[in-house]
Amino acid sequence: MPVKFAAFDKYQRSFMMPTSSIVSVNESDGKNFQNALHRFMKFDSVKTIGNEDTPMQFSFSTATNTDSELGVGSMDVSWHLNNTSVRFYYMEDGAYGMGDYVDRTAVNPFMAMDNAYGFENAYRLNDKYAFSFGLASGDNALFKTNEDDMEDADRLSVFQGGATYTPNDKVSFGLVSGMMAEENAFMGLHGNGGFDMENTRTYYAGVTAQLKPIQNLTLTGAYYYGMTPSTRLNDFMQTGKLHSDAFSFDARYHFDDTQYVGMVLSSPLRVRSGYTDLTLPTGRDYYSDTVYNETHRLKMAPEAREWDTGVYGQFNLAENIRAKMQGLVRFNPEHQADVKPDYQVMFGLNWLFN
């Protein structure tokens, strides 16, 4: 929506008013919260058969969304031969990967897709260096607000390569680079009728780092940066070069394998600079076929940047009882200025009866 609009009084005098003063687009349907709650309630949702010492390893998790194509949250099959591994996987939600809800710090934000299929080939040169490349494709879920928006989603495909450097058991660095290809969409934006979108490309790179300064404490950080070349989307719209980025940080302290506390700080993917030219007809010559157009340049970067922060933890209350909690706050939600923060608190309880 436009950042501002013109209001006219009875004397036809115009006054510019901020759109946010009367309209707030802020998860009104609660779908995002429902999905987050479902993921949060899945204790030990990822089950694994085999390990790195076996030639084959299989992992899976139960579905969170009701429209999961296979009825599962994720499936992962990998083969190991010497220093080479090949992995095939399916994920109902690429924004979360194979891990738990809070283990998404280093997940690539450009791989936001639903019902995603992919493969990855990795080669470990030695104990310090490893390389990989892979391809994934799924329903375009960039900036989705609810599951209903995905009914007519086009495909999103990603090809990327990466490298990791692990000098010791306390420090690890990662680097990924790739290309995101969208069908009939532009950074998640879909159109129809006169605003049909053409296929677009975005090139990105990301760095991740993990540090264990003391025993049981793990610090994880990630930064991703993308560039979308100037593109003519249709007869009415043309973009300049767009730059986008995302940031995340996680600090977790483990008491043992199942008990931990942590804090998170992140900023979701957003456009940081660039513009779009929108050309619209403003009139027509009555005596000829001449149509007069006017071009409006729209700033694509939002006025504010969203920041998400919070704490979480998981504890064993008894031998067969486990509890978890999470509290999150979103400042400038959906990258909107002058919007009140969102607060989210969740508690979970897992009780084994036999």
Image (cartoon, rainbow, N blue to C red):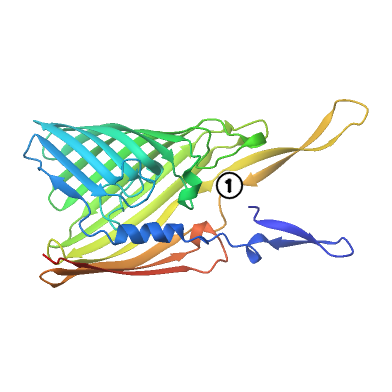
Query: What residue do we see at 31% from left, 39% from top?
Result: 176
Q: Nearer the viewer, residue 241 or 282?
A: 282
Residue drawn where x is 25% and y is 33% of the image:
120
Q: Position of residue 127 (x, y in %)?
A: 11, 39
Q: Residue at x 47, y 44 (%)?
A: 150
Against 198, residue 66 (above or below) is below
Q: Residue furthest top?
A: 289
Residue at the spot of label 1: 300
Q: Residue furthest bottom?
A: 317
The residue closer to the viewer here, 341 or 203, is 341
Identify the image quadrant of residue 126. Answer: top left
- Quadrant position of residue 155: top left
User: Can the viewer see residue 270 in this picture?
Assistant: no
Where residue 77 appears, as percent x and y from the top left, is 19, 37
Residue type, numbered disc 1: Met
Left-right relation of 311 to 292: left
- Circle 1 crowding by C-alpha within 10 Å: few under 14, some 14–19, many from 20: some
User: Which part of the image, by quadrant, shows the C terminus?
Assistant: bottom left
Tell me where residue 272 appears, x and y as whole percent.
51, 49
In percent of width and height, residue 76 lies at 22, 40
From where the camera sits, is residue 91 visible? yes
Q: Give the total number of marks visible in the rendering.
A: 1
Say whether residue 175 is left or right of residue 16.
left
Residue nearer the viewer, 11 or 197: 197
Q: Residue at x 26, y 37 (%)?
A: 89
Looking at the image, residue 179 sits to the left or right of residue 59; the answer is right
Q: Secondary structure at mark 1?
A: loop
| Residue at the far left in the pictured view | 53
| Residue found farthest to the right | 287
